[in-house]
Image (cartoon, rainbow, N blue to C red):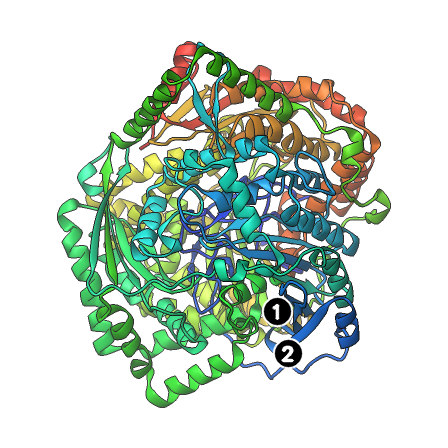
Amino acid sequence: MERTALLRSLSCSSLACNKFLFSAPKHSRSFLSKSSSVFASTAARYHRRLVPNRSLLRRNSWRSLPRASSHSSSLRFGLNNKHFSSLSPRAVASPPTQPSSDIAGVGDEVAEKLGFEKVSEEFIGECKSKAVLFKHKKTGAEVMSVSNDDENKVFGIVFRTPPKDSTGIPHILEHSVLCGSRKYPLKEPFVELLKGSLHTFLNAFTYPDRTCYPVASTNSKDFYNLVDVYLDAVFFPKCIEDFQTFQQEGWHYELNDPSEDITYKGVVFNEMKGVYSQPDNLLGRTAQQALFPDNTYGVDSGGDPLVIPKLTFEEFKEFHRKYYHPSNARIWFYGDDDPSERLRILSEYLDMFDASTAPNESKVEPQKLFSEPVRIVEKYPAGDGGDLKKKHMVCLNWLLSDKPLDLQTELTLGFLDHLLLGTPASPLRKVLLESGLGDAIIGGGVEDELLQPQFSIGLKGVSDDDIPKVEELIMSSLRKLAEEGFDTEAVEASMNTIEFSLRENNTGSFPRGLSLMLRSMGKWIYDMDPFEPLKYEQPLLDLKARIAEEGSKAVFSPLIEKFILNNPHCVTIEMQPDPEKASRDEAAEKENLEKVKASMTEEDLAELARATEELKLKQETPDPPEALKCVPSLSLHDIPKEPIRIPTEHDLFTNDVLYSEVVFDMSSLKQELLPLVPLFCQSLLEMGTKDLTFVQLNQLIGRKTGGISVYPFTSSIRGKEDPCSHIIVRGKSMAGRADDLFNLINCVLQEVQFTDQQRFKQFVSQSKARMENRLRGGGHGIAAARMDAKLNVAGWISEQMGGVSYLEFLQALEEKVDNDWAGISSSLEEIRKSLLSKEGCLVNMTADGKTLSNTGKFVGKFLDLLPSKSLVERASWNVRLPSNDEAIVIPTQVNYVGKAANLYDRGYQLSGSAYVISKHISNTWLWDRVRVSGGAYGGFCNFDTHSGVFTFLSYRDPNLLKTLDIYDGTGDFLRELKMDDDTLTKAIIGTIGDVDAYQLPDAKGYSSLVRYLLGITEEERQRRREEILSTSLKDFKEFADAIDAVKDNGVAVAVASPDDVETANKERLNFFQVKKAL
């Protein structure tokens, strides 16, 4: 019997740490890549505070591998592109939006009474908001008050903070001001907010020239609590009087005993050692500093580990005094709260200050343009495996102007950037990858987040002999495009891609108000109009009219010529692999510390050991209960007793966009074909059909839809042996294009031909480069996947498609593509035959009721075109990796340390209290011991309630065995835990905040789909919520026995440096089995 299920629901785009029971998890890509990631940014340009469970640990209770997408890159056009979600295709013109009479405002008299004057006011139709710019009369502080009906309220305060050196002052200060303040004299109020708030966003960012402190919440009381804590933190922090906070967050000498070696410790110090271990980051930093040798961008605001120890406490304090002043602040409010209340809260703080000269002292001076190009050659740390001659990187970088550009030029440059590089079919991206000269694209295209825009493009995985060829290919390709222009279809596809994304305004789990703030701030911070970046309708209409009238060549070719071809301000960066660099850097640090120790007297050493002990004692001593009470929090009465329900059929406003997922069962796939699945997904979207080249197919998707992506989805199902394993095809379009959407999904699935050997070889090289980058920058994720593969079948499947096993498969496949292409092509076809079947196919849709009704006939037609049943029998996958402790060795200055075990195997029965307990462990025990005391950038845990696997992980960690010992001490921590009612209530509320995470309409529908696939009922969700709300201290104590399974039966995996692994294996004889990965 044929089984076809059609789910109609509210749908979703983002996924987070294993909370399917309650909400679709949040998803974030790696920090590096020209991707749609909200946080995609080279760390040389931008640093953020690590939030446990919410930032770095994106290991879900199911696994969604990096997805193949028809439109996978971001567009830049005068907004802070690093914080804008995926820009992908097709739009229809919207009528101008009229101001709503319902949007509240602030009367001039009220503003005047509170000490503010109204500078200007506009209705921004693009975001249906009334925006008012105020100025605080006494200090000159500027405030943007944006009012609308969005319940996800956003506040942010931003200071211009240009550094003069690479000691990392702005970055260390960003960490430190959140460590206690005048009204909230705790060790870390920030962590208390993490524990017990309903925040939808809570973090801080350091840019090369500014520091941002944003928060968001849908609960008004919670929102104003967050605002007050942040305002007190930035204006009255304890850190400027507390040397130990400076030591903890910045740097200090550590000496446990005078007979031992001195080491460097500090959260930012170790974070930046991790950043400087990644070749892409080193390239980005080198390029930025070479492009801007004469202004503040010529140093690293995040801090260079070689320079950070030169920073003094006096310089640190002076930097705060100078720049953290209302006169130097831009303040942003957004959402449906009372605009008058915003000004009232601000006036309480701002009125305490007088005007200062900070705005003049913090001005960023523009870099003058060079008269001739510059070339720089640098080394980067590389493993000694493989052919080092083929591991070079080369990138060409241009500073485009000696002053900021007008919005029209920026918008046009953004379009040009998308035309050049935005999709796999874009000509510059295509010609570079098809050249065979390198493995993957580097450089971010147009970057406009700083005062002056830049353009960067290059390749990595290049042979040293081919570097001149890459440079010539980039220049000749740009010259050809300037002479010949772009295809009409390409221009139309880009236009629709950009328009669709702007109108859809889908920022995923990132608050829309924060996306708008960062966009506005890109101009406002330089004393330009904060309203202008929010308004795209007219510039877009003008650009379209100009293209229609003059032709695209007349619009884009002059930009290529002016800003690139005829621009002498070009810096070429060549990065050479050096297998000795990592050990050489470590040896230099050690030698420096030996000199420091040799210069000290016995009394000095004794004093340093005493200070080290004193700092650790402070770090590990919890705040007294009376101090904790000062942090404002909600009560359980503020928490809804029922979960957010998502019906399977719902009439939902999606702004005329249809979201759809088509799901196919993967369980009939032979296990030896699993590693090919990610490449199969990419091939579907980046190879052609009998009638269409892949470029034509890509452009067709861009012109008619909002984008299509294909990826594998794998999870354990609680209580079942067999995993949930599917291929998901996601697509979106305007409602009137539903027929086109399903026709194109069918075309991608059934008509694409696996015949292009050279393109497939490119996919393999790109994937290998991506995996190597993940190993260096996201080793915690690699360790987590490896442990999962040792503990359950779903984990093994996932690791075959995205872990170390996958990297090893790719390394072998490169050669196989040349020797056995017929076999690989046949295997890709076999995967298709195994998957495509009407039987068991699931279609999930999200839109308003009318669109859902009208789309049914197109879905029916799509399903009728599928084969009736799979042509392949069901496969058996009962496989796991050996359960030994393992060290995956890479060239790095920091480690990623994990340990995990299956609690269900120990007899643990799931209760909702486990969510509260695991969050509390992350925010207390691991935060204090692994991060604060241990010096790692992050330490966290995760409980996959589907498989029963409980995982500990650290991020950019200077330790290895010490961290494993901390994990093993968790059971005793729980047994000895003392917790008053307020602390317990905060832990419960914080967990509900995760569970009820804010979602846009598409995210809600995807959550509904995931729950359907995993068999999670509304009754179970309600039961888990009740268990969360009734969690007691007794639950914590009882969980200690369950978590001891990790200590007693757990597997450890570390992604670590060779030296640290060698030391660990000497200390505990052959503790780790060593696997060399790079």
Q: Is residue 516 left or right of residue 337?
A: left
- Mark 2 vs 1: CB contact within 8 A: no
Q: Amino acid at mark 2?
A: Glu
Farthest residue to the right: give it: 637
| Number of numbered markers | 2
Q: Is residue 908 left or right of residue 856?
A: right
Tell me where residue 726 appears, x and y as whole percent.
52, 47
Query: What residue lies at 35% left-to-right and 71% top-to-bottom?
Result: 416
Q: Amino acid at mark 1?
A: Gly
Identify the residue position indicated by label 1 in the image.
856
Query: What residue lies at 40% left-to-right and 54% top-to-bottom?
Result: 296
Note whether 398 is above or below 198 in the view shown: below
Tell me where residue 760 appears, x and y as whole percent.
29, 52
Query: What residue lies at 49% left-to-right and 41% top-to-bottom?
Result: 315
Q: Residues within 10 Å of mark 2 (few under 14, many from 20)?
A: few
The answer to whether residue 358 is visible is: yes
**Which tag is nearer the camera, tag 2 or tag 1?**
2
Note whether 816 is above or below 1032 in the view shown: below
Q: Nearer the viewer, residue 1001 or 357?
A: 357
The quarter of the displayed image where residue 180 is located: top right
Identify the residue position indicated by label 2 in the image.
122
Q: Which mark is residue 948?
A: none
Farthest residue to the bottom: give it: 549
Q: Secondary structure at mark 2?
A: strand
The quarter of the displayed image where residue 493 is located: bottom left
Alpha carbon distance from label 2 to label 1: 42 Å
